[in-house]
Image (cartoon, rainbow, N blue to C red):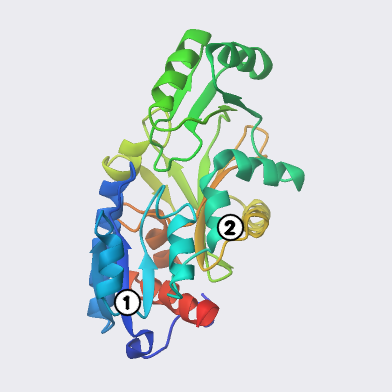
């Protein structure tokens, strides 16, 4: 871990820090856990931090509190999609993580894939589902198995693997409950990796393993059977390739501060970009803290490094 990533600043230099968590998205429960952990770490480090569960009274809270900067730990829509970032920009409150454009782009899986494709970066073939006819056309074009995803959700919410047309139609209908825009992708059979980036430095990749069909919500936040491998098991050349691909994927989206990229590897050893998260989870099951530990940063040091980037990036 380079010295540039770690924060050696006096905690008082951050001023009064609002930790924004909770919110109203489908990922509210995860955000509450992440925000509670971040708030505790900041306070233990001596930062003057307090929490705001973002709800109907949020604008009133912003107007009644003294806030020098915000630590955004809102997962999903309303916090990770550029809207909160835009509000804080208008109020001239510095904040952690990516800006408005990168946040909005990364939250939209379809637009992210389109950007990657335009730059020649590998991502699975896909289609957009709006009707049963779209489902049948996608099955004809892409074949099976496939994976269905709401385009604007995280934490694997609404996702399903399908192996026939009827299953695809059912999964599309189920995913439509969460999002009007539903994406279907070719299923990549092989190991999954997740790679965190902190202040421009790629942290050690993590290889994921689960007895579930895929790395779903239960595997991420509930199950104790999920396997995490650091080192990830790749040889030096392939790991270097994965790190470079992660850097290119983040640069294409324009992420800032911290992010996490999810990647599959097929049977031929080729890597395939799935998505980039601009406000990754910070729970006891979360991957960014795990990667940071492998790089020599404990949770408190990680949180301070993310906060320090907001100071340097936005004053």
Q: Which residue has dot 2 on it? A: 101
Seen at 53% across and 38% down, the residue is 191
The number of numbered badges drawn on the structure is 2
Residue in the image at 62% along x and 18% along y: 138
Which of 235 and 304 lies nearest the eye of the viewer?
A: 304
Q: Residues within 10 Å of mark 1 (few under 14, many from 20)?
A: many
Tell me if 281 is positioned left or right of 313 in this view: left
Q: Residue 79: horizontal and vertical position, in percent?
A: 40, 55
- Give the structural element (helix, strand or loop) at label 1: strand
Answer left or right for 256 relative to 79: right
Q: Earlier in the sequence, mark 2 or mark 1?
A: 1
Residue at 59% in and 16% down:
134
Name the element at disc 2: helix
Q: Quadrant of residue 201?
A: bottom right
Would you identify the image quadrant in which residue 248 lies?
bottom right
Q: Position of residue 155 (x, y in %)?
A: 39, 42
> Left or right: 181 with respect to 240?
left
| Residue identifier under label 1 | 17
Q: Residues within 10 Å of mark 2 (few under 14, many from 20)?
A: some
Which x, y percent locates residue 103? 52, 56
- From this viewpoint, is residue 307 visible? yes
């Amino acid at each position: 871990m380079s010295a540039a990533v770690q924060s050696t600043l006096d905690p008082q230099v951050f001023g009064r820090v609002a930790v924004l968590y909770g919110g109203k998205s489908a990922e509210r429960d995860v955000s509450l856990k992440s925000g509670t952990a971040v708030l505790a770490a900041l306070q233990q480090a001596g930062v003057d931090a307090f929490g705001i569960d973002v709800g109907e009274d949020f604008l009133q809270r912003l107007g009644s509190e003294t806030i020098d900067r915000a630590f955004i730990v809102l997962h999903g829509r309303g916090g990770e999609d550029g809207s909160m970032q835009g509000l804080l920009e208008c109020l001239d409150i510095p904040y952690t993580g990516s800006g408005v454009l990168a946040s909005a782009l990364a939250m939209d899986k379809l637009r992210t894939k389109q950007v990657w494709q335009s730059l020649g970066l590998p991502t699975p073939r896909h289609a957009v589902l709006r009707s049963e006819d779209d489902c049948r056309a996608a099955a004809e074009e892409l074949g099976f198995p496939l994976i269905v995803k709401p385009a604007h959700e995280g934490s694997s919410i609404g996702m399903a693997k399908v192996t026939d047309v009827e299953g695809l139609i059912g999964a599309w209908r189920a995913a439509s409950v969460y999002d009007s825009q539903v994406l279907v992708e070719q299923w990549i059979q092989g190991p999954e990796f997740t790679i965190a980036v902190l202040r421009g430095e790629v942290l050690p990749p993590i290889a994921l393993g689960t007895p579930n069909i895929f790395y779903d919500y239960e595997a991420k936040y509930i199950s104790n059977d999920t396997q995490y491998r650091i080192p990830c098991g790749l040889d030096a050349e392939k790991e270097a390739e994965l790190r470079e691909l992660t850097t290119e994927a983040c640069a294409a989206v324009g992420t800032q501060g911290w992010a996490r990229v999810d990647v599959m590897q097929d049977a031929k050893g080729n890597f395939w970009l799935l998505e980039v998260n601009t406000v990754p989870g910070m729970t006891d099951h979360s991957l960014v803290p795990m990667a940071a530990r492998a790089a020599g940063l404990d949770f408190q040091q990680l949180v301070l490094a993310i906060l320090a980037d907001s100071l340097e990036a936005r004053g």
